Amino acid sequence: MAVVAGCGADATPDLADVEERLADLEMRADAADAERDALADALATQHAADQDEIVDTSASSSTTTAAASTTTEVIFPEPAAPDASPFATVFGDLGELAIPRGAPGELAVVATTDGLDRTGSLGIIVRNNTPAPIGRVEIAVEAQLDGEVIGTGESTRFQPTVVGPGEISWGYAYFDVRTFPEGTTFDLSVTSEPLDGRSPGLKVIEVNQADSYLLGTVENQTDATVDGPMTITMACFDAEGSFVGIETTMINNYDIPPGQTGSFDTRILGVSCDRGLAAASGYYYG
């Protein structure tokens, strides 16, 4: 039987051929490893670049929002005319008054009389330098000498009882003495009551001086009856426009219906009061 060499399962491979094939495989493996390393390096480089881009994009898209400034400017009122209130009336030859402005933003004392009058009272004028109307003014006063308190006084009913921005109100603080030693100073603390609508104003329509008396007429210009006690307070000035005193008295009527009038009269025992400012008010009890 003839046998053909290299064609059977038991044929023996040529050694040179095997070595050549092995060398080829090893070369291919080296090339694959080199390619794998190159791809890995490229992937790492791309990943790093992507991370940098993300950081840059995040930084560029971040927005810093500064807090908006919301400072609100408070506008304080200009000083109003002495009779700006609808319930303030000038009487006599008053002329121009140089009433100080006072500190802005406060209910400020702008004038006082020079010491106490015959009744032991200190006349006071205040101005509302706030942006809103206020109710009745109240003042506590300490008389001081050489740093010591030698007397205290409380205010009576200031008029007008409603004080608009820039407007003034006048009244007095009463002490239980008639005079203080020379050098006495007065420390005043000013407050106001809230607007409650319980102290309506009366319009002073006439003030006359007859000898040592002041007398006149008030009118209820509201739509409801004004009840007593009703009072009128007058700030008195001299010919030069200086504040010299306060006169106050009761309205003679028990009540005044809408549109009706009432009368007052008072004897002047102290300084002259032939020119000044007058305001009156009463109460609502309904």
Image (tube, rainbow, N blue to C red):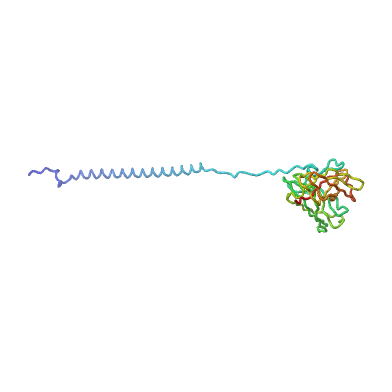
**188 or 95, which lies in front?**
95
Q: Residue at x 36, y 43 (%)?
A: 39
71 vs 14, left or right, is right
| Residue 248: x %, y % from top left | 84, 50
**56 or 92, which lies in front?**
92
Looking at this rendering, what residue extends furthest in the right direction? 211
135 vs 92, left or right, is left
Would you place residue 189 above or below residue 223 in this image?
Answer: below
Q: Residue at x 69, y 44 (%)?
A: 74
Asked which quadrant contains residue 31, the reply is top left
| Residue 15: x %, y % from top left | 19, 45
| Residue 286: x %, y % from top left | 75, 51
Number of residue marks: 0
**232 or 8, which lies in front?**
232
Would you place residue 63 above or below residue 120 in this image?
Answer: above
Q: Quadrant of the N terminus?
A: top left
Asked which quadrant contains residue 174, the reply is bottom right
